[in-house]
Amino acid sequence: EIVLTQSPGTLSLSPGERATLSCRASQSVSSSYLAWYQQKPGQAPRLLIYGASSRATGIPDRFSGSGSGTDFTLTISRLEPEDFAVYYCQQYGSSPRLTFGGGTKVEIK
Amino acid sequence: EVQLVESGGGLVQPGGSLRLSCAASGFTFSSYDMHWVRQATGKGLEWVSAIGTAGDTYYPGSVKGRFTISRENAKNSLYLQMNSLRAGDTAVYYCAREELWAKGSGMDVWGQGTTVTVSS
């Protein structure tokens, strides 16, 4: 089973700052099969990135994804007030077929 | 408008059963892979099951043998039959669509969720 470990658990930043979120896999993950989601309190998750680096429809270009193998990164270039939320990475594997990381909370400093 | 609406959640005793439904609208339901994902209060996301366009089904070990995912394309509906429920199954259950999960396209539309509480 591939385990995804996200770090840090909480990131305290100010609007306008750059956010760098990490997702590390216990085994190599194909770049095609790594996605990122944003979730705000009381809301369903929203797809941000798929295929490690492709932005989903309607996602602003301040969000970018990168990485390969076991190390993946979600970068928010300049935090907007609406970006403070919890972020999850997700991978497609063999058994189980799909797992999520534990999440990183981006909070206002 | 593309939309997924879950229903069927509620309070059930341990060992009991519940059937969740997800009504899809605004897109060609039969062309999409579908998932159920759950989230316990204050916790992260946990994938529960998936069904492909051909009706192939997939589960993690935590629910395999207890949960059954199915779809009825004529009714644009997705279902999750949950049996032998445990306290640890208490969560908000979301349905979500994916264009082609064999390509890792991501779950791009989610419902608002339905709450399942397993308690005596």
Image (cartoon, coloured by chain):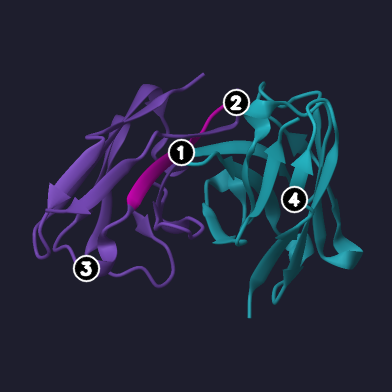
Chain colours: A purple, B cyan
Amino acid, disc 2: Pro
Give the residue pinned by disc 1.
B44
User: Chain letter of disc 3?
Assistant: A
Residue at 46% x, 59% y: name it: A46
Question: Picture quarter containing residue B97?
Answer: bottom right
Q: Do tag 4 and tag 3 residues touch (Cβ < 8 Å)?
A: no
Which range of residues does the magenta coloring cover?
A86-94
Q: Is residue B30 above or below residue B39?
A: below
Q: Is residue A80 magenta?
A: no
Q: With B108 as the anchor, is A109 left or right in this view?
A: left
Give the residue pinned by disc 3.
A81
In the rendered image, residue A77, in percent from the top left (x then y), is placed at: 15, 60
Q: Is residue B13 above or below residue A50?
A: above
Residue at 17% x, 63% y: name it: A79
Q: Nearer the viewer, mark 2 or mark 3?
A: 3
Q: Do tag 2 and tag 3 residues touch (Cβ < 8 Å)?
A: no
